Image (cartoon, rainbow, N blue to C red):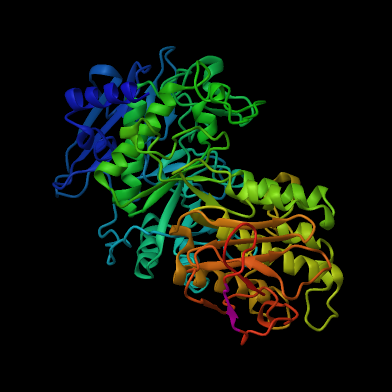
Amino acid sequence: RYSLFYNHLKNIEECEGGLDQFTKSYKTFGVNQLLEGGIYCKEWAPGAEAVFLAGDFNGWNPFSHPYKKLEYGKWELFIPPGKDGCPAVPHGSKLKVVIRAQNGTLLYRISPWARYVVRDEDKVNYDWVHWNPPQSYIHKHPSPKRLKSLRIYESHVGIASPEGKVASYKNFTYNVLPRIKDLGYNCVQLMAIMEHAYYASFGYQVTSFFAASSRYGTPDDLKEMIDVAHSMGITVLLDVVHSHASKNSEDGLNQFDGTDSCFFHSGYRGNHQLWDSRLFDYANWEVLRFLLSNLRMWIEDYRFDGFRFDGVTSMLYHHHGIGTGFSGDYNEYFGLHVDEDALCYLMLANHMINSLHPECITIAEDVSGMPALCRPVAEGGGGFDYRLAMAIPDKWIQIIKELKDEDWNMGNIVHTLTNRRYEEKYIAYAESHDQALVGDKTLAFRLMDAEMYTNMSVLMPLTPVIDRGIQLHKMIRLITHTLGGESYLNFMGNEFGHPEWLDFPRIGNNESYHYARRQFNLTEDDLLRYKFLNAFDRDMNRLEERFGWLASPQAYVSEKHEANKVIAFERAGLVFIFNFHPYQSYVDYRVVIWHSSLTVVSKYKILLDSDAGEYGGHQRLDHNTEYFSEEYPHNYRPNSLMV
């Protein structure tokens, strides 16, 4: 694998003037404004017989501005400035690349490199709009330094409002970012930013890879949003979709030059049978240029601080993970079923990012457990910084759906939370955004279900269902945060137990926005119990910021007691004790103190208590109590204390 990567890199150095020059292509391809007012256009359309540019600027004459054919399927066009020195193509002009296909048909296409596309309300397809404002947004604040502990708030701009509408970048900037900061998250991961024609695709059917979604506002609005986040010390990651692309041809990449291939594999290999989308040909030189330049553009133009790569499992294997289970056997990760071209692309992407922007972070969404995916490229690894611990949310849902409380297996919970590859960093999360979608349920809704409609008011008696749900919601999130990885992620709204589900407007729900929103107002109502979960999530994050357990070595688990339903462990000098028993409390309970000195007595106090009143608990613990370690053997260790 490293040999394949090295050969690619060597070819880039010899043929393209180096990785820096190769990945700057976003500045030359598409339609680019020159300083003197002229326009330089460049496209890759290997299957085209001829290429033209048409638009408002030439009265939509499809033949007046032909491109010149270059080597290797590339085409270029220079349009001189107007007589008065004005731009040849004014800002806001609508454009199309006109392709004469091999069968003579004229195809009107959006450039794959288009920076801004919009859809009029009375139209189905998007239009390409030349974005060249007289004064673009100028970033005022530097990016935050690379974080040791990542506490990620996964967000979708369009649903980030209690109102039933598509919310804006401006709304996120001024209403959501302060909330994220207050909750103690230091990183926001943005979904559905790359333009996607179908809103209900959750942003995963990308049509224009270089365009920030116009449904939320302008490119400058997004730049301002990122700049404001940086001013708050918040790192901003982009959910990047390079695993597949929308099948749209009128406003997407599909059949751009009139052929079945171009950016994609032709025939069966170029189609994802479950996602109904096109699959990139990662062995193609121009596809590598397109995707690597795409990453660089988002970093350098918008100032994103890194990426979460979506669908990595689909990229890594020719079977795309369809109908395939992964047990950890190495035969599952090495063989002809691995797409080495895709893996090589990921190595190139991480090498480029690490070389040109070493402060940036990359995350892999891989469910298979590919070994060394988060080891340096120089070691033959994939080069990612983190990978998602995707087994954890599945485990919590399985436990809640299938087991009675008294049947929870402490050893199995600990195994799932600690089962990760040595020296590869994992991002732990208690529930995924997929669980919030219609047809599934969030943790809170699974725990409390219909009673959330009637019994979340503090004026109502605390029912057993709500009591159990609130307490387990806090405990599940805390043990995942502290034991599950080297980073933590939360999907927006889940921190306070958002009720119901997510459902984007579509024909099946009469284009309703009722469930395509986040009801942040629920936490602001002092009469509702959502405030307890919100406060616990905030204080949990603030405690991590103070002690940094995510950046500390993996925890030492001293107890996983099946009869008592108790889990105890130490990390970052803190002792964590969880009682998952459905009805039994304990007094004088002895737990191991692993890091305590044999000769010096250590004093401990309660820092965070899920049973505290401010978190909706029953206040059964006295926070003024001091606990002292003693030289008393317990669980095969010399020191312990009583709690």
- Residue sitting at x 74%, y 53%: 441
User: From the viewer's perspective, is residue 422 above or below residue 552?
Assistant: above
- Quarter of image, res 163: bottom right
User: From the viewer's perspective, is residue 242 above or below residue 454?
Assistant: above
In the image, taking residue 386 as reference, residue 287 lies left or right, namely left
Q: Position of residue 403 (x, y in %)?
A: 82, 50
536 or 114, which lies in front? 536
Q: Quadrant of the C terminus?
A: bottom right
In the image, taking residue 353 as reference, residue 246 lies left or right, namely right
- Residue sitting at x 13%, y 46%: 36
Magenta region = 626-630
Residue 65 in sight in this render: yes
Q: Quadrant of the N terminus?
A: top left
- Quarter of image, res 348: top left
- Quarter of image, res 210: top left
442 or 640, which lies in front? 640
210 or 242, which lies in front? 242
Q: Position of residue 160 (x, y in %)?
A: 57, 63
Residue 510 in sight in this render: no
